[in-house]
């Protein structure tokens, strides 16, 4: 019971750091847009020639850092909001395991830092293969259907992967589950490409701002939920409970994705 009994306090401390990092990541996406705006010359020359130039830039930056206006633009569009919701669910399902993985693997399989590092290195390789090689091949194989079936299938496979992680009884099972994950993760670039195609080039900035707002709001949700579930269930002998919950999130994502790609205005290719 040693590791499991100590889990709630350790996991709570880890959760706080993970949530802050996730939130900071969302704000970084928004800040990058502001920096690009300034670098493009919206205020540098003006600021040198007129006292109000930099004031205007700062006011504009403050407005851009507010995630609600771009989020409202997504929510007002019947085509874009299901795609944005799909993106948010994908973020939660993907980020969730990272928040508890060390505690989970240590408690269930006795893994220490080298074991976890080796697995995460393998996972990184699987991710590169999935998004760099498998995703384009899967979309090409889908033909006229484009990214839609790849996205829905990716969510279903992600649910299977997360359930396999939770049900694993040996460390080797985690490596076997990566075969499923490699296929599942092809959905992420497919979803990004499909979403970007739904708006003209002139509206890409607003779309990406809205998606950055979604990331800012959804990113902290995964560590909060998974660490809370782990802290409650691990001492009761079910350390895989958060992974089962994330599998449920992935299934919901599959349903939302299926609805999104069935929209009559969807541009498939």
Image: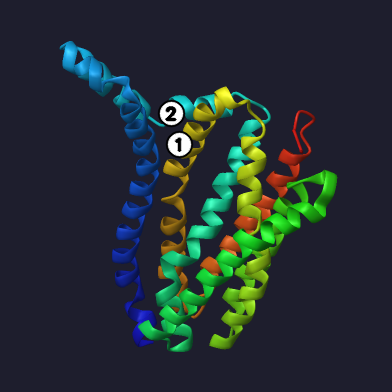
Q: What kind of element bears circle 1?
A: helix
Question: Hey, which quadrant is residue 6 in on the image?
Answer: bottom left
Q: Name the residue under label 2.
A: 68
Q: Give the residue at the far right of this rendering.
A: 144
Q: Which mark is residue 203?
A: none
Query: Is 90 or 136 nearer to us in this picture?
Result: 136
Q: Position of residue 258 (x, y in %)?
A: 75, 45
Residue 148 located left or right of residue 83? right
Residue 55 located left or right of residue 109? left
Label 1, residues with CA under 10 Å away: few <14, some 14-19, many ≥20: many
- How many circles with numbers are drawn on the protein? 2
Query: Is 96 or 64 nearer to us in this picture?
Result: 64
Look at the image and tell me whether residue 179 can be seen. Answer: yes
Q: Which residue is drawn at 52% across and 66% down?
A: 242
Check the image and report above or below for 60 versus 137: above
Instruction: Tell me whether the residue at label 1 lies in contact with that at label 2, contact meaning CB atoms closer than 8 angstroms.
Output: yes
Query: Is 169 or 197 nearer to us in this picture?
Result: 197
Q: Earlier in the sequence, mark 1 or mark 2?
A: 2
Label 2, residues with CA under 10 Å away: few <14, some 14-19, many ≥20: some
**Distance in Å between CA atoms under marks 1 and 2:** 7 Å
Where does the N terminus fall, quadrant-wise?
bottom left
Q: What kind of element bears circle 2?
A: helix
Q: Residue 213 carries which label?
A: 1
Q: Residue at x 59, y 27 (%)?
A: 201
Q: Position of residue 10 (x, y in %)?
A: 30, 71
């Amino acid at each position: 019971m040693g590791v499991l009994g100590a889990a709630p306090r350790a996991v709570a401390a880890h959760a706080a750091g993970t949530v802050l990092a996730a939130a900071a990541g969302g704000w970084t996406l928004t800040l990058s847009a502001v920096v690009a705006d300034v670098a493009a010359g919206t205020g540098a020359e003006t600021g040198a020639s007129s006292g109000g130039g930099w004031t205007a830039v700062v006011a504009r930056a403050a407005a851009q850092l507010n995630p609600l206006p771009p989020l409202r633009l997504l929510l007002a569009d019947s085509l874009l909001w299901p795609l944005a919701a799909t993106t948010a669910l994908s973020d939660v399902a993907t980020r969730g395991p990272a928040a508890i993985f060390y505690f989970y693997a240590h408690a269930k399989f006795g893994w220490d830092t080298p074991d976890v590092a080796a697995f995460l290195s393998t996972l990184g390789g699987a991710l590169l293969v999935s998004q760099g090689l498998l995703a384009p091949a899967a979309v090409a194989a889908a033909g006229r259907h484009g990214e839609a079936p790849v996205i829905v299938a990716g969510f279903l496979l992600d649910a299977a992967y997360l359930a396999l992680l939770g049900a694993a009884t040996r460390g080797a099972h985690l490596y076997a589950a990566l075969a499923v994950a490699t296929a599942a993760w092809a959905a992420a670039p497919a979803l990004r490409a499909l979403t970007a195609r739904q708006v003209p080039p002139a509206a890409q900035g607003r779309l990406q701002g809205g998606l950055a707002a979604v990331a800012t709001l959804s990113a902290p949700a995964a560590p909060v939920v998974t660490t809370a579930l782990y802290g409650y269930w691990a001492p009761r002998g079910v350390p895989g409970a958060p992974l089962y919950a994330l599998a449920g999130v992935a299934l919901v994502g599959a349903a939302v994705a299926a609805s999104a790609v069935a929209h009559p205005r969807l541009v498939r290719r």
